[in-house]
Amino acid sequence: MPKPRLLLLAATVLVTASCYQDPNAQLDQMQEQLDVANTMNELANRTSELQFTLDSLRQVVAKQDSVLYKLANLAGVPYAR
């Protein structure tokens, strides 16, 4: 009768071994997730900075366009926007 016990023991060892997770692998995965989150935050910050810069440039162009329109009007030159 030792064969069923041996099979049960082998099955138990196999199931237990398949449940094992390497703690170092878990730590590496957690670190990778933190790195991805930090990268995403950095990209969001850069996107905000680029949007602010683009808005500022649009204001500058609009102001220059208004100045050119006024100068053209004073000079009597037709100016289409």
Image (spheres, grey):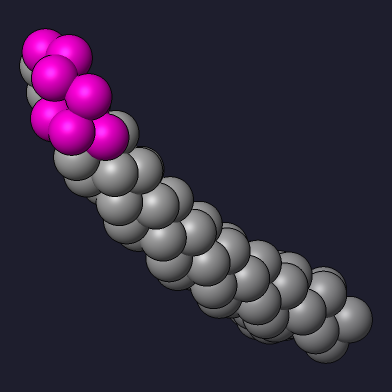
Q: Position of residue 6 (x, y in %)?
A: 75, 75
Q: Quadrant of residue 66?
A: top left
Residue 38 left/right relative to 59: right
The residue positioned farthest toward the front in the image shown: 75
Work out whether residue 45 can be spotted: yes
Quarter of the image with the N terminus is bottom right
Q: Horizontally, is 65 left or right of 19 in the view? A: left
Towards the viewer: 11 or 27: 27
Return the x and y of residue 3 as percentages of the image width and height: 72, 70
Expressed as whole percent of the image width and height from the top left, the position of residue 56 reads 41, 60
Residue at 35% in and 43% down: 64
Q: Is residue 18 above or below residue 56?
A: below
Seen from the viewer's position, the closer of residues 52 and 75 is: 75
Quick check: can you spot residue 79? no
Q: Which residues are magenta?
A: 71-78
Q: Is residue 57 magenta?
A: no
60 or 77: nearer the viewer: 77
Residue pictured at 18% horizontal, 33% vertical: 74
> Relative to residue 80, is residue 13 depicted above or below?
below
The secondary structure that dominates the magenta segment is helix
How many labels, in total? 0
The residue positioned farthest toward the right in the image shown: 24
| Picture quadrant where residue 45 is located | bottom right
Residue appearing at x 39%, y 52% in the figure: 60
Tell me, yes or no, whether the highlighted magenta stretch contains residue 76: yes
Looking at the image, residue 43 sits to the left or right of residue 48; the answer is right
Quarter of the picture containing the C terminus is top left
Give the quarter of the image for residue 18: bottom right
The location of residue 72, given as percent across then percent down, is: 22, 26
Residue plotted at (11% across, 13% down): 78
